[in-house]
Amino acid sequence: MARMFRVLGLFTLLIALMSFAGDMWEMALLFFIQSAVFFLFGYLNFTEKTYIYMFWAYMVIAFLGFTYWSVFKMGLPA
């Protein structure tokens, strides 16, 4: 499971590099931070249960953040 967190770090790093190349600075910064956290968690060698809990916590936070941003921060479609 630790290896999967390193894979998540690789994918988020690729997304960060593509958004950096596309001049989306805020998105790039967000994904660079996620990459660092995923790589850090990948090398800490927690138990499988801890990795599952951390992944579910990440998913809940990500979906709540996405829902908040899309409902309250984005403008209405024209």
Image (cartoon, rainbow, N blue to C red):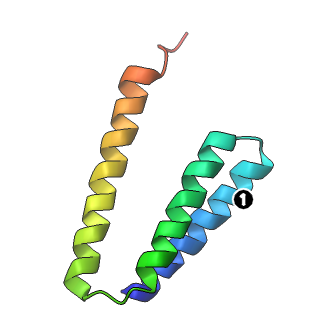
| Residue at the outermost top position | 78
User: What residue lies at 30% left-to-right and 42% top-to-bottom?
Assistant: 64
Label 1 is placed on what type of residue?
A: Leu
Q: Quadrant of residue 36?
A: bottom right
Position of residue 8 in the picture relative to residue 59 (left or right): right
Q: Quadrant of residue 54?
A: bottom left
User: What residue lies at 77% left-to-right and 41% top-to-bottom?
Assistant: 23
Q: Is residue 19 above or below residue 5?
A: above
User: What residue lies at 62% left-to-right and 41% top-to-bottom?
Assistant: 26
User: What residue lies at 65% left-to-right and 50% top-to-bottom?
Assistant: 28
Residue 12 coordinates in the image, percent (x, y) = 57, 64
- Bin the neighbour count of mark 1 within 10 Å (Cα to Cα): few under 14, some 14-19, many 20 and up: some
Residue 70 coordinates in the image, percent (x, y) = 42, 29
Q: Quadrant of the C terminus?
A: top right
Position of residue 9 in the picture relative to residue 18 (left or right): left
Residue 33 coordinates in the image, percent (x, y) = 54, 58
Q: Label 1: state its secondary structure.
A: helix
Q: Is residue 42 above or below residue 25?
A: below
Q: Quadrant of the N terminus?
A: bottom left
Query: Which residue corresponds to mark 1?
Result: 17
Q: Is residue 52 above or below residue 76?
A: below
Position of residue 16 in the picture relative to residue 23 (left or right): left
* Number of callouts: 1
Q: Is residue 26 above or below residue 15?
A: above
Residue 29 coordinates in the image, percent (x, y) = 61, 50
Residue nearest the viewer, comparing 70 with 20: 20
Q: Quadrant of residue 32?
A: bottom right
